[in-house]
Image (spheres, rainbow, N blue to C red):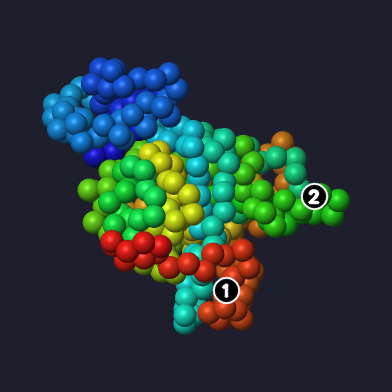
Amino acid sequence: MKIGFYGDFRPCILKTDGVVDISREVRALEGGAPQVLLENIIVNWHFLRPKLERLAERGKVIPLKDVRLRAPVPRPGKVLAGAGNFMEGTPVDPPRTLRTFFKSPDAVIGPGDTVVLPNFKPVIFHHEAELSAVIGKVAKNVSVAEALDYVFGYTTSVDVSARAPSAGEPDLTGAFYGKSFDTFLPLGPAITTAEEIRDPNNLHVRYWVNGQLRQDYNTSDMEHSVAYTIATLSHNMSLKPGDVIMCGTNHQGLGPLQDGDTGEIEIEGVGRSTIRVVDELKRTWPKAVDPAMGRGVRERRAAAGGAATPGAWPFTPPAPGRKA
């Protein structure tokens, strides 16, 4: 099942031909903000699921052409993202330690919304198409074997990134702040519930800009699996319902986003979503894949080998039943 929002953040089931409104079925869970409602739906999913499955089969479908889809996770409490979490043709032994960063929850936008490039002047703005997991219950000190049981579902995400400052600009990239400008986190079109995804580490991810295919990879290339990432983070902090875990990207195929572009992401079994891009400064870059980015990632991986990455956390989650 695919759970999302439409219109003025009315909750819905997303189908191939439209949406089925579920406002009536979740009315008792409303808590004001759309994010609170989503978290209440997630927490009560065990009770809601049978009723919503019946509604998905029999409920009135509002055609997609008549609705505006909204971000399926409107304002997550936490957004944690994997950094350099793909092997990209250069596996190292032992694997490098996991590296993650925070991305601003206020960067979230939804399907059909607009990425607004800021007046900040980087070398380039890149798209990074990624699988994201939405946490379904409080996860604290969980094992890798248990970790996927804590996932409510999956959605598509784009980690829009400002790369390196131009002369005279503050360096926002060292702490990943260049990824947290408002509108720099498109999510959607919905949350595909976990039972629909047999293996999150075997999904095809594609990203187009103006119809040109750029990123084209499989999540099986992750250096650290979805389960490992969630388990490891849970030993550092409590992960809560509605938190978003971005799983990182394969940098081969990255290219620029610029004024007038239309970007589309599709993840096998999860969904497809589109955004627009505007830039009042009308900056331009070649409308093609940026080969230097992918090449540089491979060179850095090869040079580092299995050494610990600065800022990474050298930690292995324990097996089930064993304390950290």
The structure residue drawn at horizontal position 72% and vertical position 51%, both measured from the top left corner, is 172
Image quadrant assignment for residue 46: top left
The residue carrying pointer 2 sits among few (fewer than 14), some (14 to 19) or many (20 or more) residues within 10 Å by Cα, namely: few
Image quadrant assignment for residue 138: top left
Image x and y of residue 258, in percent: 64, 46
Image quadrant assignment for residue 324: bottom left
Which of the pair 317/296 is nearer the observer? 317
Mark number, residue 134: none
The residue carrying pointer 1 sits among few (fewer than 14), some (14 to 19) or many (20 or more) residues within 10 Å by Cα, namely: some
The amino acid at mark 2 is Pro
The structure residue drawn at horizontal position 18% and vertical position 24%, both measured from the top left corner, is 59
The structure residue drawn at horizontal position 24% and vertical position 56%, both measured from the top left corner, is 198
Number of residue marks: 2
229 left or right, relative to 2? right
Image x and y of residue 54, in percent: 13, 30
Residue sitting at the far right: 168
Between discs 2 and 1, the one toward the N terminus: 2
Which of the pair 155/138 is nearer the observer? 138
Q: Which residue does the numbered mark 2 point to in the structure image? A: 170
Mark 2 against mark 1, which lies toward the viewer? 1
Q: Is residue 305 visible?
A: yes
The amino acid at mark 1 is Ala
Secondary structure under the numbered disc 1 in the rendered image: loop
Image x and y of residue 77, in percent: 49, 37
**Label 2 to label 1: alpha-carbon separation:** 28 Å
The structure residue drawn at horizontal position 80% and vertical position 49%, both measured from the top left corner, is 170
178 left or right, relative to 26? right
Image x and y of residue 152, in percent: 31, 43
Asked if 131 appears above or below 19 in the picture, the reply is below
Secondary structure under the numbered disc 2 in the rendered image: loop
Which of the pair 195/139 is nearer the observer? 139
Q: Which residue does the numbered mark 1 point to in the structure image? A: 308
